[in-house]
Image (tube, rainbow, N blue to C red):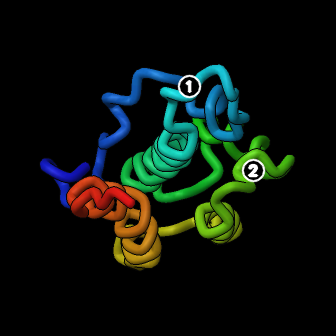
Amino acid sequence: MTTDYGGFGHAVNMNVRFDPLKFIDAERDPKAYYIDIDLLRAGSAIAIVCEFYDVWCNEFYLPADSCTRYQDALEVGRLRFFPDIEEFLRAATARYVVPVEDGWFAEAVVPIYKRYVLGLFAQLAAPQRSA
């Protein structure tokens, strides 16, 4: 996303090699202190948005068969850690037809990209301060 598109783009989800629903609402395990659960959840949420984005690029309407599982997860509250992404996905599916010329979809994902993708890199680039 960062090198090829500078954001969401067509087929950006082709390198997703995991099921986002497996981790979207993963719980913390005190024994697995080496796992960044927030990053795992956020990556899962971004992978779901990538799928919706790709459907929009190809078909211009939602819901699509490939998004049904994600919509079901949305409806039962599995994306609760990401209220902004929940709101975006609900708005996207409520619109049903979102032609590329409309531009709504492309604009709506910008804050998500900035918060979760660029925000991660900004956090990693920030100097680490010890107390």
SS at mark 2? helix
User: What residue is shown with label 1?
Assistant: 19
Separation of residues labelled 1 and 2 (CA atoms): 15 Å
Tell me if I can see residue 117 in this picture.
yes
Q: Which mark is residue 74?
A: 2
Q: Residue 128 carries which label?
A: none
State the residue at coordinates (20%, 52%): 2
Circle 1: is it few (<14), some (14-19), or many (20+) Cα within 10 Å?
Answer: few
Name the residue furthest right. 76
Q: How many labels does the image show?
A: 2
The amino acid beneath tag 1 is Asp
Relative placement, left or right, of 2 versus 107 is: left
Instruction: Find residue 54 and report its horizontal and vertical position in percent.
Output: 41, 47
SS at mark 1? loop
State the residue at coordinates (30%, 60%): 129
- Which residue is nearer to you in this view: 81 or 92? 81
| Quadrant in which the C terminus is drawn | bottom left
